[in-house]
Every structure is written in C-alpha cells, then in structure tokens.
Image (cartoon, helix red, strand yellow):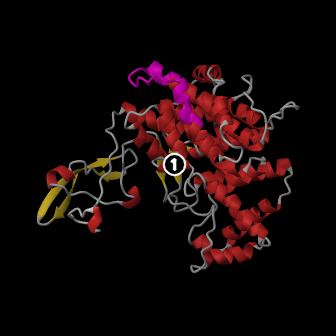
Amino acid sequence: MTAKIEFEGKQYELPVVLGSENEYGIDISSLRGTSGGLITLDRGFKNTGSCESAITFLDGEKGILRYRGYSIEELADNASFLEVAYLLIFGELPTETELEKFHSDIKKESLVDEEMKKILDGFPRSAHPMGVVSSLTSALVAFNPTTVDVRSEEAMYKSIVKLLAKFPVLCAWAMRKNTGQPLDYGDTSLGYVDNILKMMFKKANEEYKVNPVVSSALNKLLILHADHEQNCSTSTVRIVGSSHAGLFVSISAGVSALWGPLHGGANQAVIEMLEAIKEDGGDTKKYMAKAKDKEDPFRLMGFGHRVYKNFDPRARIIKKSADEVLTDLGIEDPVLGIAKGLEKEALEDQYFVDRKLYPNVDFYSGIIYRALGIPTEMFTVMFALGRLPGWISQWKEMRQQKEPIGRPRQIYTGANHRAFVPLNER
C-alpha cells in the first residue's frame, strides 16, 4: 500500500503504515532524500506520527482510551495503580506473584539519600513544587551515576523500580516543603497509593489513618493520568531519551514539559478560574455567558479537550469519585459549589452540548485535589505522579526500538545572505 505526492511535475511514492486499530499513516522518512530536500510542515505536530508504539490507543472522536488493549473504564474499576504501572511498562498485567515482587522491590528502594535534603533546603518555601520536583528528579542522577544498560533487562528493571520508589517521596517532600511540614519517609506496610497519601498528609503529632474513599479516588486519578499517547510531555521524554540521555534526566524533562498551563497545569488553572469567579461574586451564569461571547477574552478552563471531540472518557469515571469524595468529607467550600454550578449549566446548556464542551478530567481532578486539601500549586505534581509509569514505558519502548535521535526539520523564513557590516559603519 502506497501514497503518492506530486510536486513540480514529479511523483514520489511513499509507503503507508497500518496500525493495529486500522489507523493509516504515510511514511515520509524517504521523502527529503528522494525529492532533493522536500519536507512536510506540520505546526505543533498535530498530524504527524513520531513513532510506532504499542502502549496506548486513543480515539478522540469516539472517546476511547486503552492501555495495552485494556479499556480505561475496566482498569479504573478493577485494577490498582501499581498493576497499571506494571502493565504499561512491561506489556502485560502482572500475576499476583509478579505484583508482590514488584511492590516489594519498590519498597526496598524507597529511601532517598539524605543529601537530597540539602538540595531541597536550597529552595525557598515559595518555590513552585513542579520546579522542585523537576530539579530533584534530575538530581537523582548524581546519586545513581551509572548509565542504564538498555540491553540488560535486569539493569532496566532496577532503574525503573528506583524511579517508581523515589519519585513519590520527592513529590511528597515538595508538598511538605510548600506547607512547612517536616519531611516524611512513608510506611512500607502500606500499599503504594496509601503510602503516597501518608507521606503527603501525616501530621508529626498524629497517627495517620487512610480514608478508603480518598484512597480509591486517588487510585483512579493516577490510573486515568498514567499515559495519554504522544502528548507534549511524553514526546519530550522520548525526544530527550533519543539522545541516549538517562531515564531520570528524561523524566525530569517530562516534568518540566508537563508544568505548562496548556498541559498538566490545566487542573491548577481550573481552580484559579473558580477562585476568580468567587472573588467576582460567584455568578456562574455571568461567566457562562462570557465563555460564549467570542469577543470576551475569558476562557472556561476544564471544559472540552484538544484530542477528545466527544466526552472525555476519563471524566466520566472520575466524576463519580468527585461526588463520593465531596459527600464523604462533607466539604462546604464556595469554590467547589461554583464548580458544581458550572458543571450543571454546561451539561444542560445547548451551546456547550452542541459543541461537546463537556467537563474534562482536569475539571474533576482539580475539584478532588482541592477537597483533599492539596495546595493548588501541587495539582500538576499529582498529575506527574500518575504520568510517571507512562513516561517510563515510553522511554523504555523508544530505547528498545533503537529509535534515531529526534531532529525535526524547519522551513527557514529569515533574511537571505547578507554581507557583514563593520561596527563603525552601522
């Protein structure tokens, strides 16, 4: 199967690649060489496939998301986050024995070198937690300087386990630094998600008890964020890793890419929007009208999605958890009340229904994180916690497929050749 491009009277025949879900892609790898320099221009890479991947399938038109062939709905309802992490990274759901060993190995690596505290102490309390986490993740290289031998399954496994063990500690430390609390190392008797909650929320003078409703909601949120095909941060991890940069450094780059408000920072932007609405009197109808006014610069955060042209399948799942958390904790928060009001109006307003501008996963995750008492600046860190196994699996796949170093081309639009003018003549 081939496709043809005709330019200036010449035809170029290009192979067509067929994916396992009947997706077609024109392979333009040879186009520049055979045509004498012709390339394609695709701003934002919206129509360009950068790789072939067996990890995640996403169909935005139909609202489908699957990890390694398993639907996000089944995984969120039946699996633990650690099971999903294993699935993404190693390709299959673990047996009971495999999962126990995986968790045991992670717990053995969960201590972070004491000198990392000195790096953390160097940040002011006002530092954004994402900057802290990105820096601390990169700093892990100094304490694990050996380059990962990607040809060795054992070496790859050890590096993966170390990162899954230490990254939650760094995230929890970033939050405790932000809130002025003493650092916590966690409890190896707890499950992976429950231990994250304990490291984040335990008070020094109180015993910490896991709330099963909160634990279930966080487990689902982490699963829903675990991977999402070739988004900005995942593509960053792969392109940084394509230079043969190590796993920890590549993940650190992914954290930085996730930080932006158009990517992982969207759930923080939701709460900031709700706060602004509250400060202006809390009139949701006024702001729904502003959102529909094309001349108004106001943007309704947390509604619609760049990829999903229908309802975000992750939002369907987490909406229920958001309702359960708010009910169980008995939260009375005017900002969350505004969120529920916006949700109700958007689901009933024909303007939003016709345009399929439904609440997305960022909208509901922001509501849950605020209800749990997580600082707004930490929301994107929580996203990174969930996305970690996806980044790892994408980096691992890229290295094992021996992909070439990423090197996009460009169309130059600058000045033509100019003669140099000496300084005294300018």
Residue 224 is a magenta residue: no
Q: Is residue 406 above or below residue 416?
A: above
- Give x and y (percent) for residue 39: 24, 57
Q: Residue furthest right?
A: 205
Choose top left, top right, bottom left or bottom right for residue 194. top right
Crowdedness near tag 1: few (<14), some (14–19) or many (≥20) residues, C-alpha within 10 Å:
many
Three-letter amino acid code of the residue under disc 1: Ala
- Give x and y (percent) for residue 374: 74, 47
Look at 51% across and 62% down and name the residue there. Answer: 309
Left or right of 292 in this view: 16:
left
Which is the main secondary structure of the residues drawn in magenta?
helix
Left or right of 109 in this view: 369:
right
Left or right of 410 in this view: 226:
right
Q: Is residue 151 above or below residue 385?
A: above
Please tell me whether mark 1 sits on a helix, a strand or a loop. Answer: helix
Q: Is residue 256 above or below residue 423?
A: above
The one nearer the camera, 111 or 33, is 111
Look at 14% across and 60% down and name the residue there. Answer: 11
Choose top left, top right, bottom left or bottom right for residue 218. top right
Look at 59% across and 23% down and name the residue there. Answer: 102
- Give x and y (percent) for residue 151: 38, 23
The one nearer the camera, 369 or 174, is 174
Q: Is residue 237 visible?
A: yes
Bounds of the magenta segment? 136-158
Look at 11% across and 66% down and name the residue there. Answer: 9
Quadrant in which the C terminus appears: bottom left
Residue position for label 1: 257
